[in-house]
Image: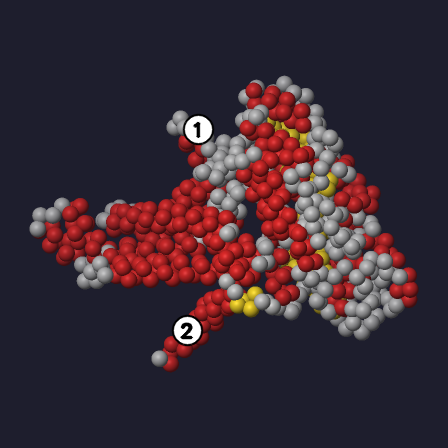
Amino acid sequence: MFLLVPSLAILVTFTHYPALAALWTSLVTPGVGVSISQFETMVNDPVFGQALRNTALFALGTVPASMALALVMAVWVNRKLRGRGFLRLAYFTPAILPVVATASIWLFFFTPGYGPISRLVTTLGFADQNWLGDPSTVLPSLMVMNIWKEAGFLMIFYLAGLQSIPPELDEASGLEGGGSWYNFRRVTFPLLMPTTLFVSVISVAAALKSIDFLFIMTGGGPANASTLLLYYVYEVAFRYWDQPYASALTIVLIAILLSLTFLQLKVVDRRIHYR
Amino acid sequence: MATSSTDTPTSEPESDDQEPTTTTPGEGSGELVEIDLYYPIAVGGPLQELIDGLVTDFETENPDISVNAIYSGSYDETMVRAQTASRSGSPPAAAVLASTELYSLIHADLIAPFDGLATTDEDRDWLGSFVPAFMKNSVDGEGRTMSIPFQPSTTVQYWNKDLFAAAGLDPETPPATWDDIVTMGTQIVESGVAPNGIKVPSSAFQYALLQTFTTQNDVELQNESGDETYFDDPRAIEALEFWRGLASEHGIAPDGLVEWGTLVEDFLQGEMAVLWTTTGQMRNIADNATFELGVSVLPSNVHGGSATGGGHIYIFKDAPTEEQQAAFRLVRWLTQPERTAEWSIATGYVAAVPEAYETQAMQEYVSEFPPAGVALEQLETAVPPLTTYDWGRVSKALNDAVSAVLTGQTSAEDALTQAQAQAEALLAPYR
């Protein structure tokens, strides 16, 4: 118990106290007292509604896709292949690049006219798009970038999970006459469930927390079409200097994160075979 | 303390009899005054070395002052840092922040008027030595000088002479009117030499680019005291309709928003024949253009017009008085004509002191690189950028309106009427 004190002190100072302070700031109006006026403002704030929708779409669009891609890549590089180490490194590269650098590169990829994506699309005979400058394409474009960035990172966890599966099980399933797809469906995937749970928790949290690329690529635009909730919190706190409202938004974000994590742990946990 | 720093600009002549607190090093307490200066970097090039060099020179000439020049990221980040430092009780003596932060800083009660720190007639003359276009958002509604232009810029027009020639246009004649933009742009696009006639950036700072069109259309978007806006003026609506029309009606500009991040590259790649962007990019474009480059003032409609932008130096009122006075001396030193010329040549920022253009260094520079002179000419018709109370929200309302129109989601009239209503609700409490 005594050994837990240092980490507890750090958690309290930098996590729990700020969260409670944010709750306090969001509820107390100087000179008025405790009120829920900030939360009433929120209900009537169209930008908040849009940020919430964008965040939900962004999470739904990126989390399952990057998890699936990560699993496929992990199974692929887990085989006995020539240049396996190189392949693993290649898949992992997006995760080790600084976000600001990747965002700048993708900004160029999405450039209409001479950008690589526009070139590809026009070569295939489709009309060119102003990817980041059009409200209907900006969020999907950012999702593509995020899937590319996240999948390699998540692959590492799946790879670790795959390597902890005893090879006898594969052999046993082979003896039973199961094909490789059967083996994957009935042996590998169920045994990977603990990894899947962990990966889903961290990737949902990442989807709700990663906003750094917005500063480089869109600034939340056009007209809020790519504003995510945390980016909106930043805007309210440090562009409008409205601390109470920013605190209220932060509380909502924390509540969403906590309840999603809770749900994942409680619901998914019941279906997991740890052995 | 601070009783001598009055809030009105009209300091009495008697104040000359007060103890001289400036220009005489060593007098006063004789102790070393240490001050912090926060500054952002928003242009390419070795700016940090330049600032460090300037600070070292200043310290050599003023041995009683020690300056910590602290690089603080972008303009936004520097603002965050200055605000949080002030609120936690240890403000910097001075900071370079966006000129548009004027009323936010006044409302937060963080900055001190320069008038109160000016003690001599020379000091007061110095306050009047800047280009008027920049001082319009240095001086507040009560006539106090709250900031000094340090790294200012304005929007000018760049054109690709090779593309003009290839399209059968006179390469030496850039668009000079709104009609020219359309006819020349149409000829560029129809002759197939470039996909676009013109690009005007719109992924950020939409308000400033809108102001180039509105000023050309003879309408101001706000009053001088920053508490009233005129976004829904018919001439403003007409200006935004013209901007949108470049893409939707005339097909000479790309549909949707034009990204700042790849803007210069677009121009260098020959994606468009005409580019409107900041003077801050002049050196960069001139150095990298593989074609004959032209730089001119922006076209006129009713008359010429542009908006200024960039960074001003502010002095923080909660810093100790001797630090404020030291900061005042630093700012005055930094903006002497020779030094302004040097700074402008090295960075590409516009020289905010007209006398700087009379220095030998600047005259040689302009004769060798004529586009540098275009900035001064453009300033004659430039207005300050949108600068109001609650600026973050007011400018956001206008930016969103412009974005919605340029992406074809709504009409200019609806968007600007709505932005005006939002601004009205935000600003009413400040009147």
In the picture, measured across the screen, residue B396 lies left or right of residue B56, that is left
Residue count near mark 1 (Cα–Cα under 10 Å), binned few <14, some 14–19, many ≥20:
few
Q: Which residue is more in the foreground, B185 or B167?
A: B185
Quarter assignment of residue B161: top right
Nearest to viewer (mark 1 / mark 2): 1
**At 52% from the left edge and 59% from the top edge, which residue is drawn?**
A38
Callout 1: chain: A
Please determine whether, in this image, residue B116 is positioned above or below residue A189.
below
Say which residue label 2 marks. Answer: A7
B392 vs A146, nearest the viewer: B392
Extreme left residue here?
Answer: A176
In the image, taking residue A36 as reference, residue A4 lies left or right, namely left
Residue B157's tag is none
In the rendered structure, the residue with mark 2 lies on which chain?
A
For the point 35% across and 50% down, the residue is: A63
Residue A242: quadrant of the picture: bottom right
Circles 1 and 2 on the same subunit: yes
Which numbered disc flags the more N-terminal residue, 1 or 2?
2
Instruction: Report which residue position mark 1 lands on.
Output: A127
Residue B230 is situated, as x and y percent measured from the top left of the image, at: 68, 42
- In this rendering, does residue B287 appear at all? no
Q: In which quadrant will I find the N terminus of chain B?
A: bottom right
Is residue B300 shown to the viewer in this render?
yes
SS category of the residue bearing label 2: helix
Q: Amino acid at mark 2?
A: Ser
The location of residue A258, given as percent across then percent down, is: 38, 62
Q: Position of residue B64 (x, y in %)?
A: 77, 68
Q: Amino acid at mark 1?
A: Ala
